[in-house]
Image: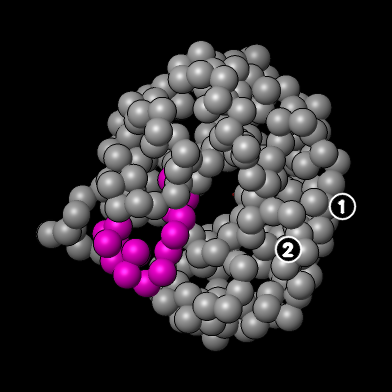
Amino acid sequence: MRKNIVAGNWKMNCNLDESQHLINALKLEDFEQIKAEIIIAPPFTNLYPAHQSLQDSKIKLSAQNLNENENGAFTGEISPEMLKSVGAEYVILGHSERRAIYNETDELLAKKVTTALKHDFKIMFCIGEELDKRQAGKHFEVVENQLKNGLFHISESEMKNIVIAYEPVWAIGTGETASPEQAQEIHAHIRKVLAKKYNENVAEGTSILYGGSVKPNNAKEIFAKKDVDGGLIGGASLDAKSFKAIADSF
Ligand code: PGA
């Protein structure tokens, strides 16, 4: 059965001291009783110290991106093996900031997915529409195409390592959230698309997270929806108490 997950995407925030401070604050909170997997995604440079600090904790570690190549002349890039060697178990792929600011296409993301799976990563694969697409009623089509072009080359058994994060671009960092009904509607649609491509088992077994301005005051209502299995949290994951309060929604 699918898992509930609360994941913190720290983005490009926290130097090493700040990162360790936040991790220590998270370790003071009791996540053990929460019926959800808890993941944090600090910047690359903080992963190894984070991994060492989290040895005795239930909190799992994710990278925010990886390069689709194994190694070689790719100045400034980070390979899957490097990330594995510093303790990352998950990787976020296809975040809308990567798609929009760094021009990551579906085609590139499909390669990243293949490389990440080869290295036994679990992937949080992000999809979501921009405001004009939502206003034009094209959001179902957008997410369907993102899944088809970036993810659906993988096999049914590989889908076990995939978590989907639906993040409407208009809700990310804006304070604007999809209503619980809007989230439920599109999550149910994503599940239907998974059933059509694979089967009911994959559709029912895949965790689908909502992301976009999730805060302690709206998480419970959103997570209560039948097809919402948790959240990918940006801003509110940078504060241990807010992150815990969101996780407490389960
Ligand atoms: P936000 O970010 O919670 O700050 O809106 C979510 C995300 O980008 O993953």
Residue 113 point in image, percent of width and height? 35, 41
Choose between 65 and 124: the one closer to the eye.
Answer: 124
At label 1, the amino acid type is: Asn
The quarter of the picture where residue 107 lies is top left
Residue 45: mark in rendering: none
Choose between 50 and 96: the one closer to the eye.
Answer: 50
Q: Would you say 163 lies left or right of 3 here?
A: left
Task: Determine if the magenta segment contains residue 151.
Answer: no
Q: How many residues crowd around disc 2 within 10 Å: few (fewer than 14), some, or many (20 or more)?
A: many
Compared to 160, does 58 lie above or below? below
Q: Residue at x 61, y 28 (%)?
A: 204
Choose between 135 and 76: the one closer to the eye.
Answer: 76
Region of the chain picked out in magenta, as a range: 77-93
Given contact means CB atoms under 8 Å apart, are the residues at marks 2 and 1 in contact?
no
User: Of helix, strand and loop, which one carries label 1?
Assistant: loop
Is residue 46 shown to the viewer in this render?
no
Residue 2 point in image, percent of width and height? 62, 39
Give the color scheme: rainbow, by chain, secondary structure or one colour: one colour
Residue 217: mark in rendering: 1
The quarter of the picture where residue 236 lies is bottom right
Is residue 165 shown to the viewer in this render?
yes
Q: Quadrant of the N terminus?
A: top right
Q: Residue at x 46, y 55 (%)?
A: 90
Residue 243: mark in rendering: 2
Q: Residue at x 44, y 34 (%)?
A: 159
At label 2, the amino acid type is: Phe
Q: Earlier in the sequence, mark 2 or mark 1?
A: 1
Compared to 97, does 225 lie above or below? above
Residue 220 point in image, percent of width and height? 84, 47
Structural distance between the alpha carbons of marks 2 and 1: 11 Å
Compared to 174, does 62 lie above or below? below
